[in-house]
Image (cartoon, rainbow, N blue to C red):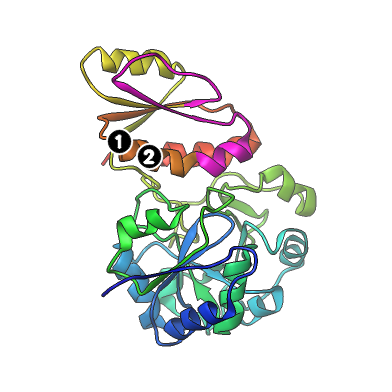
Amino acid sequence: MKTEVWRIDPEQPDETILARAAEILRRGGLVAMPTETVYGLAANALDAEAVRRIFQAKGRPATNPVIVHVPDFASAEPLTERISPQARLLAERFWPGPLTLVLPKSEKVPDVVTAGGSTVAIRVPAHPVALGLLRAAKMPLAAPSANRSNALSPTRPDHVLRGLEGRIDAILDAGATAGGIESTVVDLTCDPPRLLRPGLIAPAEIESVIGSLARTASSEGPLRSPGMLAKHYAPNTPLELSLDAKRRAIELSEKKQRVGLLLMSDSGPNNSLIIVRTLPADPRGYAAGLFAALHELDDAGVGCIVVEAPPEGDAWLGVHDRLARASQRG
């Protein structure tokens, strides 16, 4: 299969291109689309065979559910048995946007979408291309990140091609995504609601709308959200976090090892064996550039990537989560 790449304006997407992509989806095919977080791999969420093709293309375990994307709140209602008052409040505040709500699933949703569980994860993306494709396709779209399973998430179309070329039908190339890490996921089927995956929306922002939020996810039963596996978002190169990343990188270079070093708004050591990338010291800016920087270091032929540990605090939870999972071995 040849993967088509169609350049599309991120602000005013061409309706002809969206119609071509929508036709692929109606035929049960796969299209990578930009969202405001990362690129997602879209298929008709109501077509079990189409969703299975996502799992096959990604090499994704069947136990890992996928998020369903819809163009508006009204389109979410048929996918769930019940919309709670809390869900309505969060949707009013954060949709379209990088917040995924876990709700009781309706019979319309195939089991492959939810990994056999009784809940479904839903969000309304904020990217004009994703919204345009949803409206053109006139169907909910299952869309996990458009990469091979457990690998670095894609924030640019070339990242998608690196893992999925020849495995999917088309990519809507709208350039780099703005958010950089995946959506925050909140489970509204329990009391109090539970944070399943931290992301671009901090827990305090959610609590300001619905009150107390549990911060630890349950390990019982089927997974209710993607992004809960111990190893995820990982480069091929071993990655480690360090409170003194410069010193650690110098130690490794003294053993004649090429090292990738990721810092926050600072210059690195003057050492030909150390390849340095820097990210902003604010959580939004850091998140936006994180995966792109890791892709660059992963491609640089280094033996290890050392990451300066980011600050603590609610605003940094999503970044810490991605780095912790990326540093897992095995």
Task: Quarter of the image for the N terminus: give it.
Answer: bottom left
Pointer 2 and pointer 1: residues touching (CB < 8 Å)? yes
- Disc 1 element: loop
Q: Residue furthest left?
A: 256
> Looking at the image, which residue is at 32% across and 55% down?
162
Q: Nearer the viewer, residue 78 or 302?
A: 302
Compared with residue 124, is residue 290 higher up or lower down, i.e. above or below?
above
Q: Nearer the viewer, residue 171 or 124?
A: 171
Q: CA distance from mark 2 to mark 1?
A: 6 Å
> Looking at the image, which residue is at 30% across and 13% down?
251
Name the residue type under label 1: Ala
Horizontal and vertical percent position of residue 102:
59, 64
Question: Can residue 182 be seen?
Answer: yes
| Residue denoted by label 2 | 296
Q: Nearer the viewer, residue 266 or 49?
A: 266
Residue 300 has which mark?
A: 1
Compared with residue 261, is residue 4 higher up or lower down, i.e. above or below?
below
* Quadrant housing residue 299: top left
Q: Is residue 79 left or right of residue 222?
A: right
> Looking at the image, which residue is at 38% across and 48% down?
152
Residue 231 has which mark?
A: none
Compared with residue 248, is residue 194 higher up or lower down, i.e. above or below?
below
Horizontal and vertical percent position of residue 227:
46, 52
Q: Is residue 230 left or right of residue 184?
A: left
Horizontal and vertical percent position of residue 295:
38, 43
Residue 286 lies in the magenta stretch = yes
**Looking at the image, how many numbered discs can be counted on the residues?**
2
Which residues lie in the magenta part? 263-289
Name the residue type under label 2: Glu
Horizontal and vertical percent position of residue 326:
39, 40
